[in-house]
Amino acid sequence: MNILDKIVAHKRQEVAAQKERIPAQALETSPFFSQKPFSFKAALTDPSQSGIIAEFKRRSPSKGVINDQADVVQTTTGYASGGASALSVLTDTEFFGGTTADVIAAREANQCPILRKDFMIDAYQVMEARAMGADVILLIAASLSPAEIRTLGGFAHSLGLEVLLEVHDREELERSICPEVDAIGVNNRNLKDFTVSVDLSRELAEFIPGDFVKVSESGISDPGTIVDLRRYGYRGFLMGENFMKHADPGAACTRFIAVLRSMEANAFAK
């Protein structure tokens, strides 16, 4: 059993218990259900924005504790003011140290798209995402069948949410892509051995149809990498550890985006 299988097995138990605690009907009473979500796609494809999806992540199975002292409101507002196009907030507690309260806090403090980052396996979690104020959910191809992706993606759309589909190789991409998703995220991290290579994003770029927003996930630490990936059609860049490893993640994000914009301005001038 690899780490993803272990996480999903635990998630099934967790979701079942949560359904007992809070019925689905109760989620619909959240004030966020009546608020119009922000568009993830629009934010990433806006040429005036950075395309950075800045992530709040306390720990991970591969890295252990990354930063368990950062405040979610201070960090996410720092990301947004520093130029991030969207936010990603982990809500898995067992393996990543996140909570649903983190998304709620980020939503109340920010006016930009928020990705609920979790292992989505049930429509109940999609309703939870809407109830906590998220604008987009993550569906991981490695843990879902094509039929499950279509069902969960369609349900998310019915609630006004957008969908980021995460793939790890060409086979996952080709069997999972469907109209019920809005963006395709290439995870550059191998889930079997945790090695990371941004070359995977370059290799898969040509197989992602142009009507989906291309997102590169994991392993980005150099603004020059983003400049290069834009040439392959990528418009979104999910970054977490590179910022969270600093005492002030928001300030690290601000510095990174400032360098990125300088590099892009110089490239445009040539």
Image (cartoon, rainbow, N blue to C red):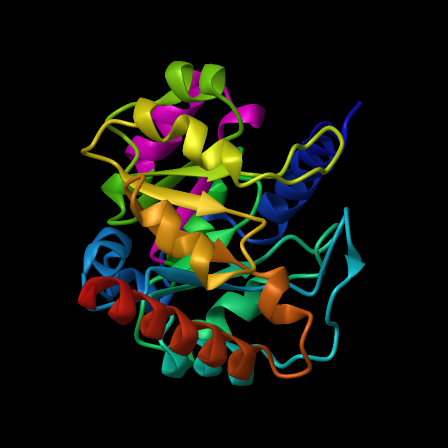
Quadrant placement of the C terminus: bottom left
Figure label count: 0
In the drawing, does residue 75 fall left or right of residue 263?
Answer: right
Question: Can I make out residue 27 in this image?
Answer: no
Q: Residue at x 44, y 58 (%)?
A: 224
Q: Which residues are magenta?
A: 135-155
Residue 83 in picture, x, y percent from top left:
35, 76
Rendered view: 215 above or below 212: below
- Furthest toward the front, the residue is 270
Q: Residue at x 77, y 47 (%)?
A: 61
Q: Quadrant of residue 158?
A: top left
In the drawing, does residue 131 fall left or right of residue 71?
Answer: left
Of residues 83 and 91, the one nearer the viewer is 83
Quadrant placement of the N terminus: top right
In the drawing, does residue 204 fall left or right of residue 217?
Answer: left
Q: Residue at x 53, y 41 (%)?
A: 198
Residue 64 in picture, x, y percent from top left:
81, 56
* Residue 108 covered by magenta stretch: no
* Residue 153 covered by magenta stretch: yes
Of residues 223 and 143, the one nearer the viewer is 223
Question: Can I make out residue 104 in this image?
Answer: yes
Q: Residue at x 69, y 32 (%)?
A: 4
Q: Quadrant of residue 97?
A: bottom right
In the drawing, does residue 2 fall left or right of residue 119?
Answer: right
Residue 57 in picture, x, y percent from top left:
63, 63
Q: Quadrant of residue 231?
A: top left
Q: Main secondary structure of the magenta part?
A: helix
Residue 138 in picture, x, y percent from top left:
45, 43
